[in-house]
Amino acid sequence: MPEPLDSVTQDVHVGGARLETLRYDGDAMRPAIVLLHEGLGSVGLWRDFPRSLAERTGRTVVAYSRHGYGRSDVLRAKREPDYMHREADVVLPALLAQLGLVRPILFGHSDGASIALIYAGTHSGAVRALILEAPHVFVEEISVRSIAEAKSAYAVTDLPAKLKRWHDDPDATFYGWNDIWLDARFRSWNIEAYAQRVRCPVLLIQGDADEYGTTAQLDAIAARVRDSRTLLVAGARHSPHRDAPELVLAQVAAFVAETARDPDA
């Protein structure tokens, strides 16, 4: 397996916003893996996972911080309930085009998984495969409860200082995510219909101790896609790739290698 090159960082401008990206170059003849982070994530919060994934798969791996996250431009406007749709319909297609990434494998975590699912359901021929870690397709009580608890914790703990390490404006990042998920208008948010239109293989990953969602999310997706498999990680919480990195890397690498058996991969 070829070793990836050193990481390359690049700012990309999409929709008037500057977005930070990180890239490890691998086999240019195979589809790249694009990482879409969680609701409070960023390029930096993936930590060493992009490098490890590139080393394990031999693929090019790209991560980016969405508008309002990490070292990308700070988002001052409030998010609306369709913010993930806008990311999938407007930002992600433009970003992939600028980076020259054709028919990638999308690896999304939490909000990023939902964005990846919307994109694949809208552009069915533009995705080689989906890896969805802790995805949301509808709003559960456990999600609302945990997000409300996070709001309380943000006010009285050192969480702002911890987020400052990874985001230029932790308050804007935190409340941008927290406010929309607790908005009464968001309770009816549902993207199950997009799963019905997915035409690529899907790997579903979730921790069995996930504090932000239940396996009902995975069941809803698996019932609607043509080709799916599920990895339920014992003891893992909302981020199995951090709680059980070796297991997740091994399963993701096997799934990615399986897609290579298709002559069109």
Image: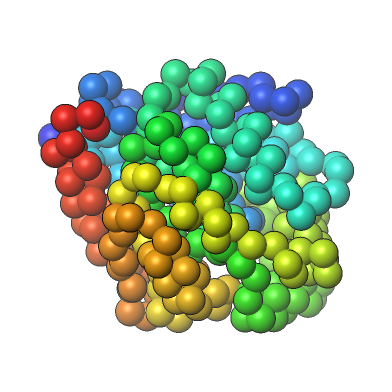
Q: Is residue 18 above or below residue 143?
A: above
Front-most of residues 55 and 177:
177
In-front residue for pair 92/37: 92
Q: How is the image coloured?
A: rainbow
* Residue 255 pos. (x, y %): 23, 51
> In the image, what residue occupies the spot 80% across and 51% down?
80
* Nearer the observer, 178 or 88: 88
Residue 4 image position (x, y, % from top left): 27, 30
Q: Is residue 170 above or below residue 223?
A: above
Task: Kindly identify the residue that appears in the image at 14 percent across and 39 percent down.
Answer: 261
Q: Does residue 69 sit above or below 95 in this rendering?
A: below
Could you tell me which quadrant the C terminus lies in?
top left
Figure label count: 0
Quarter of the picture containing the N terminus is top left
Q: Residue 169: x percent and y percent? A: 77, 46
Question: Residue placed at 30% from the left, 67% from the top?
Answer: 231
Question: Is residue 127 visible to us here?
Answer: yes
The image quadrant of residue 101 is top left
Residue 165 x %, y % = 64, 50
Residue drawn at the location 63% of the way across and 56% of the way down: 40
Regarding residue 170, the answer to whether it shows in the image is: no
77 relative position to 241: left or right? right
Classify residue 58 as left or right of residue 139: left
Q: Name above or below for residue 84 compared with residue 264.
A: below
Position of residue 8 in the picture relative to residue 74 (left or right): left
